[in-house]
Amino acid sequence: MYKTGKIAMWNESRMEAVYERPVNLSSFFHPATFLSVFKQDFARRKNTAMDDLRLKSSWRHTPGDGVITITNLLIEGALFEGSNITDCHANSDSINVAPDCHLSWVNENKGENDKAIKLPLYETNTREDILAYLNVENNFRENNKWIQAGVAFYVTC
């Protein structure tokens, strides 16, 4: 019932309304379709080819044209401290709520952040369907540590 109510609300609004308030991807039956529509809309508005775009993620508020805020993501295997990831504590849960993530699209040829690691965003904690890869700032020397820890984001458990 929750998802059908959300769909009815989305059908009545225009795409620009998406950029105005946080989006909870778990309210969609197919979050990958929403991300694809977001990319198509961005490419159309910027008059650029979809193949030339790559997803940019930020954990700091970055208002701007074509930025959406994703809320209620879950992270497993690490904790957030500001916009960086840190080790889980002995008494912390293995899955925690991540801060809001701000997504936009940029041209493929723009430079990448050397101090960021790309972590997968899965639809569920079964880790079957990857929706995207999200950049998270960290010490680049620790990338292998986070990969070995299996750090990942989920839309729902």
Image (tube, grey):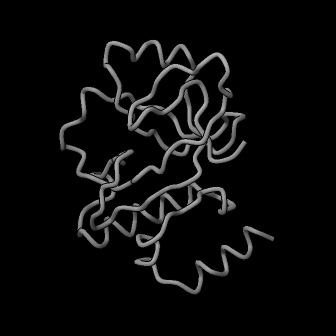
Residue 119: horizontal and vertical position, in percent? Answer: 47, 32
Q: Quadrant location of the N terminus?
A: bottom right
Q: Residue furthest left?
A: 110
Residue in front for this viewpoint, 83 or 124: 83
Q: Residue at x 45, y 78 (%)?
A: 17
Residue 120: horizontal and vertical position, in percent? Answer: 51, 35
Q: Residue at x 68, y 28 (%)?
A: 93
For residue 5, what is the image quadrant? bottom right
Q: Is residue 134 left or right of residue 12?
A: left
Residue in front for this viewpoint, 13 or 108: 13
The number of callouts visible is 0
101, above or below 86, in the image: below
Q: Is residue 116 left or right of residue 76?
A: left
Residue 106: horizontal and vertical position, in percent? Answer: 26, 52
Q: Is residue 102 left or right of residue 108?
A: right
112, above or below 71, in the image: above
Residue 147: horizontal and vertical position, in percent? Answer: 49, 18
Q: Residue at x 74, y 73 (%)?
A: 4
Q: Residue at x 38, y 70 (%)?
A: 41
Q: Residue furthest right?
A: 1
Q: Quadrant location of the C terminus?
A: top right
Q: Is residue 133 left or right of residue 93?
A: left
156, above or below 69, in the image: above
Q: Residue furthest bottom?
A: 12
For residue 133, what is the image quadrant? top left
